[in-house]
Image (cartoon, grey):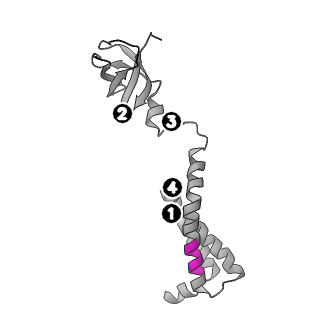
């Protein structure tokens, strides 16, 4: 095994890159993307030069992995975050609740109470400018503050 690692052919780097890409696809974290790209680059360079210079190959692999991880990760995260989607609020708690309608589960005293959204009760607070709220009154979520729903009674502007 040591002999193979010290005299790795170019195709071994491509196998490592492919294996790391498969693992990356299974995890989806982008952590294994950088060593996979680094292994592919070392494989390409090894086809032209560095043949038999195993220390140089491994140092190049390590340096590329660190460099790509440090400098590439912010770009990848920004790109993933800005990708168009047909469900923009899927994993965003706040935006996925805004606009939903429910009913007050308790009377709102001092602007605080609980509402039912579907089969779940949530702590809620009335928007400023709205008074008390009775049990069973329809509300609409206008914003969130952590896990507290900010609501307004329906039928009022």
Q: CA distance from mark 4 to mark 1?
A: 8 Å
Q: Which residues are magenta?
A: 57-63
The mark closer to the camera, 4 or 2, is 2
Vertical position of residue 117 compared to residue 16: above or below: above
Disc number placed over residue 28 in the picture, else none: 4
Q: Is residue 8 visible?
A: no
The mark closer to the camera, 2 or 3, is 2
Kindly identify which residue carries mark 2. Answer: 147
Q: Residue at x 56, y 69 (%)?
A: 65
Q: Earlier in the sequence, mark 1 or mark 3?
A: 1
Q: Residue at x 56, y 57 (%)?
A: 73
Q: CA distance from mark 1 to mark 3?
A: 28 Å
Q: Secondary structure at mark 2?
A: loop
Q: Earlier in the sequence, mark 4 or mark 3?
A: 4
Disc number placed over residue 89 in the picture, else none: 3
Q: Secondary structure at mark 3?
A: loop
Tag 4–tag 1 contact (CB < 8 Å) = no
Is 17 positioned to the left or the right of 96 in the image? right
The main secondary structure of the magenta stretch is: helix
Q: Position of residue 55 (x, y in %)?
A: 57, 85
Tag 1–tag 2 contact (CB < 8 Å) = no
Q: Position of residue 17 (x, y in %)?
A: 58, 69
Q: Earlier in the sequence, mark 1 or mark 2?
A: 1
């Amino acid at each position: 095994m040591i002999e193979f690692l010290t005299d790795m052919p170019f195709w071994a780097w491509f196998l490592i890159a492919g294996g790391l890409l498969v693992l990356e696809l299974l995890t989806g974290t982008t952590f294994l993307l950088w060593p996979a790209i680094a292994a592919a680059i070392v494989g390409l360079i090894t086809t032209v030069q560095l043949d038999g210079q195993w220390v140089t190959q491994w140092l190049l692999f390590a340096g590329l992995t660190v460099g790509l991880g440090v400098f590439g990760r912010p770009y990848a995260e920004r790109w993933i975050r800005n990708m168009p989607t047909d469900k923009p609020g899927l994993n965003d708690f706040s935006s996925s609740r805004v606009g939903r309608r429910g009913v007050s589960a308790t009377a709102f005293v001092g602007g605080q109470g609980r509402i039912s959204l579907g089969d779940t009760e949530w702590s809620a607070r009335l928007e400023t400018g709205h008074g008390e709220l009775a049990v069973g009154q329809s509300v609409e979520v206008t914003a969130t503050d952590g896990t507290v729903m900010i609501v307004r009674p329906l039928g009022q502007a």
